[in-house]
Amino acid sequence: MNFLELVKARYSVRNYEERPIEQNKLDYIMECVRLAPSAVNFQPWKFAVITEKKLLEALKSAYPREWIKTAPCIIVACGDHNVAWHRKLDNKDHTDVDVSIAVEHLCLAAAEQGLGTCWVFNFDVPLCKEILGLPANIEPVALVPVGYPASQEVPEKNRKPLQDILF
C-alpha cells in the first residue's frame, strides 16, 4: 500500500482480538521507531514493550478504561528531558515533540503490519512510573496499546477539509 493508503488505514483501535503479537512484528515496529527523526538527532526516548501478563495488567490500572483490557501489548513511550534538545532562543524543550514523532512511526508501522494502536495520554503518570520503576528523569509520555483489531472495518475519519488547515 502507498503512504496515503497507510495513513487512511490507521485509526484509533479500542477493541483487540485475544491473540498474541508475533515477535518479528514487534521487532519490525520498534526498528521503525528507532529510525524516527528527532531534533538535533538527540533521540530523547525510551520505550517499554509490555506483553508479560502480570506487568501488562498492572500497567492497565494506570488507564482504567474497559477497552484497554483487550490489548495484548502496551508500548510505553517515554522521554528524557535531560537528553532532549532545548531551543536556544526560548529554551523550549522538544521531548514531547520528538517522542510524538517516534510514536507516530510506531502507529504507522503497526498499521502496515495489520495491527491496531491507540494514543493514550490521559493516564496516571506517577503510577506508570512506579509500575515500571522509572528513574526521575524519564517521563512516560504516551501509552500505546497494540494488537490485532477485533473488527476489520476501518471507521471513516472525521477530519477538517484541507482548505481549513491551510493559511
Image (spheres, rainbow, N blue to C red):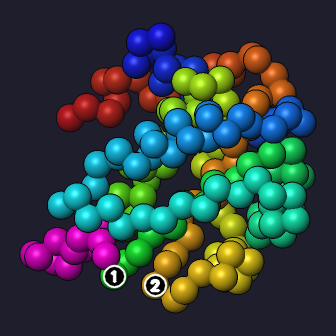
Instruction: Check disc 2 and give the amino acid type.
Output: Asn
Disc nearer the start of the sequence (1/2): 1
88 within the magenta span: yes
| Mark seen at residue 82 | 1
The residue depicted at 49 percent of the width and 78 percent of the height is 138
- Outermost residue on the top side: it is 1
The residue depicted at 67 percent of the width and 30 percent of the height is 115
Instruction: Check disc 1 and give the amino acid type.
Output: Asn
Residue with the mark numbered 2? 137
| Mark seen at residue 7 | none
Q: Position of residue 13 (x, y in %)?
A: 71, 36
- Outermost residue on the front side: it is 24
**In the image, residue 24 above or below residue 143:** above
Q: Position of residue 84 (x, y in %)?
A: 30, 72
Span colored in magenta? 83-94
The residue depicted at 65 percent of the width and 44 percent of the height is 118
